[in-house]
Amino acid sequence: EDQVTQSPEALRLQEGESSSLNCSYTVSGLRGLFWYRQDPGKGPEFLFTLYSAGEEKEKERLKATLTKKESFLHITAPKPEDSATYLCAVQRTGGFKTIFGAGTRLFVKA
Amino acid sequence: DARVTQTPRHKVTEMGQEVTMRCQPILGHNTVFWYRQTMMQGLELLAYFRNRAPLDDSGMPKDRFSAEMPDATLATLKIQPSEPRDSAVYFCASGLVPGTVTGELFFGEGSRLTVL
C-alpha cells in the first residue's frame, strides 16, 4: 500500500537556523514526488516536483532532494515568513493517484 | 487569475442533515481530487476523477458519501446523513495529468464543515 511519512511533526527554529524536513515514501510506480506549502486557513500551494533519484530543485531558501526511499526539504537561513506546514505527496503512474503525508509544521522565530 | 473555487467556505449543520459541497476546477484541467483534512489524519484522499470518470473512491465511506462530476465545470461531494466525525476541512484540487511539466495540483480554499 502506498504510504508517505513525514518527520518531524513540528519543528521550531530561530531565524537563520538551517534545518531539514524528511519525507519517507512507499509507492508502486512513482511518477513524481511533490512538496507543498500550506498556510493556516488556506489550501496547499505547490513548491516542487521531483521525478527521479538524485534530482534536486531549489527555490529561494528551499532545496528539495530525492532518493529512492525518501526526500528532504532543506531550509537555509529561514525567516519568520517561512513558518507554515510543509506537505509531501507522491503521485503514482497509471491513474495518477496522489497521496499526502501528514505534514511538518515549521515555526521560525525572529 | 485561474483558480479552483469551492462553496460553501463554511458550513455548520446538525447531525443527520445532508451536506453538499461544490467545486469548480480550473478550466481545461482534466483531473479533480477530493481530500479531507483533520488535525489527526492530515490530508486524506477521498476520491478522484479523470476526464469526469471516477478512478478511485476507496477513501470514502460508501454508505454516506458520494462524489460526482455532472459536467467538466462542476464536481460535487455529498454527505447523507452527516455525522459529527465528518467535521473537517474538505479540499478540492484540480490538475492536468499528464500534460504539465510539474504535475502539480491546484487547491481551492477548502470547505470547513462542522456537524453538531
Image (cartoon, coloured by chain):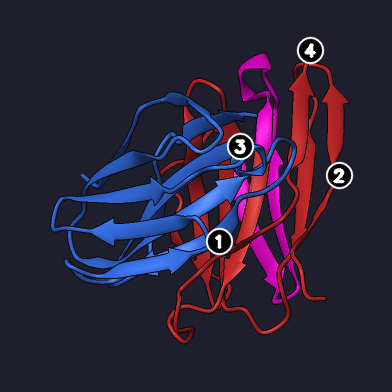
Chain colours: A blue, B red
- The vertical placement of B11 against B78, above or below, is above
Residue bearing mark 3: A83
Instruction: Provide residue B105's location: percent of width, then percent of height.
Output: 55, 65
Q: Decide which of B101, A75 is in the foreground and name it.
A: A75
Label 3: few (<14), some or many (≥20) within 10 Å? some
Residue type beneath disc 1:
Phe
Outermost residue, left direction?
Answer: A68
Above or below residue A96? Residue B64 is above
Tag 1 secondary structure: strand
Reading the image, the residue beneath label 4 is B116
Residue type at mark 4 is Leu
Q: Nearer the viewer, residue B109 or A52?
A: A52
Residues in magenta?
Answer: B64-89
The magenta stretch spans residue B88: yes
Residue of label 1: A46
Name the residue: 30% across, 49% down.
A72
Residue with the mark numbered 2: B8
